[in-house]
Structure formats: C-alpha cells, structure tokens
Amino acid sequence: MRIQYRADLAEMAEELVQMGDLVGTAMWQASRALVDVDAELAEHVIAADSHIDARHRDVEERTYLLLARQSPVACDLRLLTSGLHIARDIERMGDLAAHVAKTALRRAPESAVVPELSEIIRTMADHAHGIAGKLVTVLQRADPQLADELDHDDNVIDTCQRQLFAIVLGPAWAHPIASAIDAAQLARWYERYADHAVNAGERVRYLVTGINSTSV
Amino acid sequence: MRIQYRADLAEMAEELVQMGDLVGTAMWQASRALVDVDAELAEHVIAADSHIDARHRDVEERTYLLLARQSPVACDLRLLTSGLHIARDIERMGDLAAHVAKTALRRAPESAVVPELSEIIRTMADHAHGIAGKLVTVLQRADPQLADELDHDDNVIDTCQRQLFAIVLGPAWAHPIASAIDAAQLARWYERYADHAVNAGERVRYLVTGINSTSV
C-alpha cells in the first residue's frame, strides 16, 4: 500500500511537470498564432485547452482521493495541498493562453496586433514562454533559486504592459478602438500568465525552504 | 468524533453561505463606488477582498484536513470536494468585485463610466447583485430550480455585455480610448462574476440531483 502511495505521489509530481509543459506550449503556440495570424494554430490551442482542463480535473480528483484514502500528515499533506494549488495556477495559465488564441482567431485574417505593438507583444510572448520553461524546471528540480528568477521575468512583463499602455493611450494612437481593447486584454493575459507562474514557483520554494515570501 | 465531523461539515456549508454574502456585498459596493464615484467605498471593497481571500484559504485548509483526517467516502467526499469548487468560484467573484472597485478608484474623482454606458452598467450591476443573492439562497436551500434561474440571469448580463460593446465600438463613440478599455474590462468582470455564480450553482444542482448539465 505504501509503495503504491509513493508511486502515486511521484505520478502527481510528474503530472504537474507535464501540465506545465502543455501550458508552455499552449502560450507559445497562441503567441505564434497571434503574431503570424494563424487561425488554424489558434483553433488548435483553444481545443487543447479543454484537454488541459480535463487533466487538471483528473489531478484534483486523484489528489482528493489520496487525501481521503491515505490520511497523509505533515510533509505529505503539505505536498499534496501545494500540488493542488500549483495545478490550479497551471490550469489558469492554460486558460490565459486560450484567451490569447481566441483573440487571434476572432481577428483573423486580420492581425489582432497593430504594427507599433508587435515588438512589445513579441517580447511579452518570449518572456511568457521562458517563464513557463523555467517553471517546468523548478517543478522538476524543486530549485528555489530558479523560482526567484521567475519574479525577475515577471517584472519584465509588467514593464512591457506599462509600455504597451503608454502607446495605446498616447497621442499618436491612430487605430480603431477595438485594437486598443484587444491590446489591453492581451497585455493583461500575458501579465496574468506570468503571475500564475510566479505563484506556482513560490509554492515550490515554500515546499523546499519553508519560507513563504508572498501571500499566495 | 463523528458528531464533531458532522458539525465541521455544517460549518463548512455555513462558511460558503457567508462567503457568498460577502462577495454579493462586495460587488454591490463596488458597483456603487463605480456609479457614484466613491473612492472611499472602492478602497473598502479592495481591502475587504483580502479578508475574503483569507477566509477562502481557511476553508480550503480545513477541508483538506477533513479529507485527510476523516477519510470520507461517497456522498461526504463529493460534498467536500464540491465545497472546494464552490468556495473557489465564490473567491473569484470577490476578486472580480475588487477589479471593479480598482477601476472606480483609478479614475476617481472622474467617473470610469461614460454617460452613454451608465444605464447598461447599472443593469449589469443590478443583475450581478441579484445573482449573488440567488446563489446564497441556492447554497442555503440546496434548491436546484433556483440554480436554473442563475443561467437566465447570466444570459441577461451576456446581452448587456454585447450591447456595451456595440456602443463602445460604434460610430458615435466620442470618448478617450482609456474609457473604452475601462468599459470593456468592466463588462468582462461582471460577465465573469455571473459565470462563476452559475458554476457554483451548477455544483449545488449536481450535488442535489446528480445531473451535471455543464462541464464545470
């Protein structure tokens, strides 16, 4: 029974890594769909998100069953409940990638990103992809220092968001209102995506070091 | 032990009702702050949201402990895990109320809502408040028919959102881009608020009837 339990715990950890991989790919593809105006790729991301949601539900249900059947205490209890929080953050990252893809799809065959913003959006997309990759590594190695780097990357995305707003609300803006709304939403989704990665990384740090540096 | 366990379950259910009350009040106050341009009230809503978040964390932790210590099966397991989902939806409703309050606060002493949209925003605010009240009643009475009504109210909010976008993106729009972005975000937050209430109501219906009419 205990051997099976240890195998179940390891499987949960591996499942989180795989979910992290999936939402990293999802945001990367959503960003490509957005920048390259690729409706087919956008549709793929949207469809894939329902699979990520299903995996999240499955992780939750199996964790609840482990809690109820194995009556874990102390470390294992903290491990399982942290896993639930991390899984939720990752699932939300998948939703946000799907939001980006939906915007790309809604505007296709036009681009949802006006030329002046394409560089900022690319930078946000690159950092979002880098953040997801780091999160996966944090989950694999339980590396608290790498979790710290997520904070830094998140700051870069926040800066991009402010730059984007300065352009959209600036005097030189000469595009339709719909483009401004799209831009504001896209920036928000990248920013939220990064926030959830930081939260998930913070949980890992807390598990490893016992130090909870932010309210999550 | 069992008597304590029953008391714990009842306490969880009561906690959800209270959280539902709090997020209903939060959105009502956020809407007042928005429409009346009341910065003080907006600040109150934002501060109160951290208390709602804390209560949510407390409900989660206590539910995890109940799962781990009481090893519930069948009905009780479903009750507890549904409670976790409902608590999460309610907590998100609180976040969305805080988002509305933050927009009101950011624009104060100006209004974040332009005159042409005030009627639509009021309608969304009224329905959001009504939805929260119905959700509390659904939680108290476990009434599946009232849960159905939430779907209808949600449709009204969706219609308002479309009407708002028609005005913001229409030819007569003569306000700054920032007002358009605010309006789009506000509409989205009311819409998401209602969606989470519908999800929570759906969970109650599922608990009572065993029929899961939507993917939640």
Image (cartoon, coloured by chain):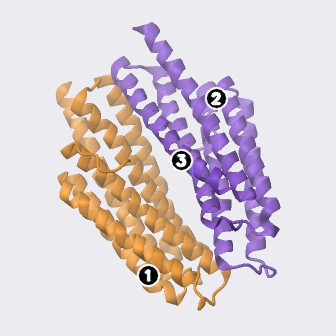
Chain colours: A orange, B purple
Q: Residue B47's mark?
A: 3
What amino acid type is highlighted by mark number 1? Ile
Q: Nearer the viewer, residue B158 or B185?
A: B185
Q: Which amino acid, by three-letter code, is at mark 3?
A: Ala
Chain holding disc 3 = B
User: Residue A129: x and y, percent?
Assistant: 34, 69
Between B161 and A199, the one lying in front of the other is A199
What residue would you read off at disc 1?
A120
Q: Residues within 10 Å of mark 2 (few under 14, many from 20)?
A: many
**Circles 2 and 3: CB atoms closer than 8 Å:** no
Q: Tell me the subunit letter for badge 2.
A: B
Q: Secondary structure at mark 1?
A: helix
Whether the residues at callouts 3 and 1 have beta carbons within 8 Å, the answer is: no
Q: Is residue A94 above or below residue A5?
A: below
**Circle 3 Cα neighbour tier, 10 Å, few/some/many (<14 / 14–19 / ≥20):** few
* Figure quadrant of residue B210: top right
The mark found on residue B77 in the picture is: none
The residue located at (72%, 35%) in the rendering is B134
Q: Which residue bears the numbered disc 2?
A: B139
Marks 2 and 1: same chain? no
Amino acid at pointer 2: Leu
